[in-house]
Image (cartoon, helix red, strand yellow):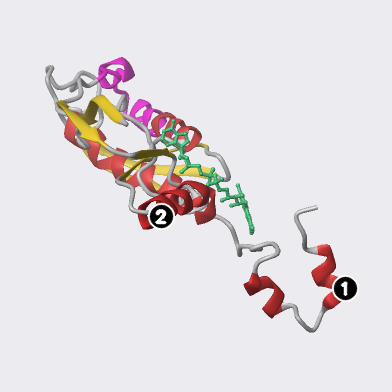
Amino acid sequence: MLIQSFRMTALGALMLGVSAVASAGVVAGTYDGSADGKLSRVTTSVTLDAEGRLSDVKLDVSGETPALGGAAASRMAPEMVRTQSVAVDGVSGATVTSEAIRTAVKTAIAKAGADISRYEVKVAKAVGADEVISADVVVVGAGASGTAAALAAAEGGAKVVVLEKTPSVGGAGRIASGLFAVESKLQKEKFKNQPELLKELTYR
Ligand SMILES: Cc1cc2nc3c(=O)[nH]c(=O)nc-3n(C[C@H](O)[C@H](O)[C@H](O)COP(=O)(O)OP(=O)(O)OC[C@H]3O[C@@H](n4cnc5c(N)ncnc54)[C@H](O)[C@@H]3O)c2cc1C
């Protein structure tokens, strides 16, 4: 299989326009904001200088899923400072947390008396060069199923490409507490002294 025009998107956004810095009416200081995330209240502490520049954005997303909401916070906070905009990209798979982060930061900026529209300038992204990759098997999605399929194909000698839209692999398996491995030899061994329970733990 041939994947044409596989566009590699640069991880960092490149600031192309004029930075959105407000100054009139801004009172320098550190301001708090918050908004509802997916699982918890997302909070922020935003520092603006006398010119209205965002000099620091701290986020607390400890109540969100670390692999998703945590990834959004660690990417978005430095991007907001770098671009002086809250309109930075969120993280796939953490849409709700990403939007909560934007809302919380905007709330904090508004408390400083700044014109929030100045911080909502969409920042142009740097786009990488097209790349053509040839593969025998392309797996879309690096969750448990996709990675197992990719591994099996690779073990069978295929050249495999796995495409994953989120920042990390594992899918929902990253938030599972423990996998059942239904009807596997591992499960049978673990519950060999509980035949009645074993009968319940089946596909059917
Ligand atoms: C909160 C939660 C708790 C769970 N707890 C347990 C548990 O304790 N025990 C248990 O046995 N099971 C549990 N499960 C279920 C288990 O985690 C899932 O059944 C299993 O992980 C599903 O794997 P999957 O690969 O089929 O799908 P997913 O894990 O959903 O993987 C799909 C992958 O594809 C990616 N993807 C989707 N669309 C695209 C695209 N267009 N391009 C590129 N990538 C894409 C996704 O980002 C994701 O990484 C839980 C599930 C959830 C949601």
Which region shows up in magenta? 104-122
- Quarter occupied by residue 191: bottom right
Q: Earlier in the sequence, mark 2 or mark 1?
A: 2
Is residue 63 inside the magenta stretch?
no
Residue at (58%, 57%) from the top-left corner?
176
According to the picture, the residue beneath numbered tag 2 turns out to be: 151
For the N terminus, the quadrant is top left
Is residue 108 inside the magenta stretch?
yes
According to the picture, the residue beneath numbered tag 1 turns out to be: 196
- Label 2 and label 1: CA atoms lie apart by 34 Å
- Quarter occupied by residue 189: bottom right
- Quarter occupied by residue 175: bottom right
Q: Nearer the viewer, mark 2 or mark 1?
A: 2
User: Helix, strand, or loop for circle 2?
Assistant: helix
Task: Say if residue 7 shows up in the picture.
Answer: yes
Residue at (48%, 48%) from the top-left corner?
143
User: Helix, strand, or loop for circle 1?
Assistant: helix
